Image (cartoon, helix red, strand yellow):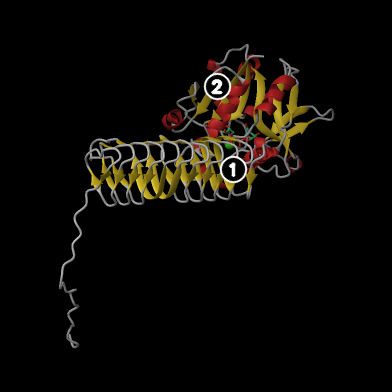
Amino acid sequence: MSVQVVILAAGQGKRMKSSLPKVLHCLAGIPLIEHVLKTAARVSTKPPILIYGHEGERLQQAVANYNLTWVEQAEQLGTGHAMLQAMPFVSSEDHVLILCGDVPLISEKTLQRLIETTSKDQVGLITANLSQPFGYGRIIRDAQNRVTNIVEEKDASETERAIKEINTSIYLIPCGKLKAWLPKIKNHNGQQEYYLTDIIPLALKEGVVIHTIQPECEEEILGVNDKIQLANLERFYQAKMVKSLMLQGVTFYDPARVDIRGDITIGRDVTIDVNVILEGKVIIGDGCCIGPYCLLKNSTLGEEVEIKSHSIVDGAIIGTRSRIGPFARLRPETELAEDVHIGNFVEVKKTKIAKGSKANHLTYLGDCEIGQDVNVGAGVITCNYDGVNKHKTFIADDAFIGSGTQLVAPVGIGAGATIGAGSTITKDAPAHQLTLSRAPQQTVENWQRPQKIKMKENR
Ligand code: UD1
Ligand code: CA
């Protein structure tokens, strides 16, 4: 069966109360539409067709790295009308798999089951039994349990409203047949919309069987219409991700207080304290220990790395047994080798630090190359920016940079060099020698501290 995915996403999403198109709101850090596109790519190799209505440009920008066929539905006249817009772009030999842009968690597994169990001349439909079916189209079945119709909430009788089985709006339909049915749909209903669901009686007239399956869990088919539903799905998704990591052996101090927003690979015997956010592509090696309130984004940690509380690690590579934080900030293109220590209130950017080096307190290291076993004292600042260009600082092995030193780049510190505390280093410092630039200390004799002048009382 050749499957063409069509994603319905022209609805405005009024209930989100937002200027951002609904499908661009994020779940686990990724726009809703991207969740659907990722799943679509796993069930079909053909570029999906996306039916959009509002803010086409913004949508196109947001998912620019996906190969899609964009089809505009200028006026939202209903799901049947939306599908009609897609018809010129699909081949009659294909089967269309209809997904919704605002139903982000439909699983590949359930879609594969729909594709595998629906025969070529049937209509496949995912239905679900909800304890709260309000708002959904209800599935009407006959005495033989065959689906005969779908009735929308607004058009349903009281008995029909009592039905718990609902239409998820995920279908698999032979395209040739759909092309014939869609133009026959009328908008004579409570909402004066062209309902895609009206293909069901048309299919029946031609003796086409409606084959239904149910998802593995309810959350797979839940849509996002408002911020509450979005938050509920977010929590469901987070719980699922954390569970799968725990099954891989990760220890979370509290599985409810962690957020996973990306592609996470975690080794054995890793512990993660509360309120940690893992974002983008994060790889954490065996035996690492992540303290509370840390953000780890697009970074790779070797083995037994310790990230202490309140640290931000963004776009960094950290070597085995290195210790970061508390309150450290590693920025993109930071590469730390083994046994490096970065302490509190230290910011590191675009800097390579070799094995065993330390910068333990209140320091900025930007655009540096630092050798092995270097000691960077408290309050050392690289002055890497002259207002126009960025310049590099080189510090060779075993150098010792005294506290409060400014290294005005471009500048180099030789191997084993010692820089006296409080120096402003503007020229290269030679290896194995003490270099310092410091105004001589003086004591002013008989100096009087100024006194406060007493005011007159009646002023
Ligand atoms: C539709 C179904 C209903 C089902 C429900 C599941 C119809 C008539 N009803 O309800 O049986 O239970 O989905 O969520 O099909 N859209 C467009 N263009 C339009 C209208 C909608 O692209 O003109 C898109 C929306 O962006 C959304 C999807 O279609 O992604 C479903 O539309 P929505 O309004 O959420 O669903 P209902 O019409 O209420
Ligand atoms: Ca609607």
On the image, which quarter does residue 373 sit in? Answer: top left
Q: Residue at x 52, y 37 (%)?
A: 320
Question: What element does badge 2 sit on?
Answer: loop
Residue situated furthest right in the rendering:
143
Camera-nearest residue between 448 and 402: 402
Residue situated furthest front in the rendering:
432
Q: Residue at x 61, y 12 (%)?
A: 92
Mark 2 belongs to which amino acid?
Pro
- In the rendered image, which quarter contains the C terminus? bottom left
Provide residue 317's location: percent of width, then percent of height.
47, 35
Residue 300 bears which disc, if any? none
State left or right for residue 373 relative to residue 230.
left
State left or right for residue 118 relative to residue 452.
right
- In the rendered image, which quarter contains the N terminus? top right
Which residue in the protein does label 1 denote? 234
Provide residue 351's location: percent of width, then percent of height.
38, 36
Provide residue 193's location: percent of width, then percent of height.
58, 32
**Ligand 1: quadrant of the figure:** top right
Provide residue 7's location: percent of width, then percent of height.
56, 27
State left or right for residue 369 relative to residue 241.
left
State left or right for residue 110 relative to residue 228.
right
Residue 201 appears in the picture as rendered: no
Whether pointer 1 and pointer 2 mark residues with C-beta atoms closer than 8 Å, the reply is no
Camera-nearest residue between 235 and 123: 235
On the image, which quarter does residue 205 sit in? Answer: top right
Mark 1 belongs to which amino acid?
Glu
Residue 48 bears which disc, if any? 2
Residue situated furthest bottom in the rendering:
458
Which one is in front in this view, the residue at disc 1 or the one at disc 2? 1
Question: What element does badge 1 sit on?
Answer: helix
Residue 71 appears in the picture as rendered: yes
Q: How far is the residue under mark 1 from the one under mark 2?
A: 25 Å
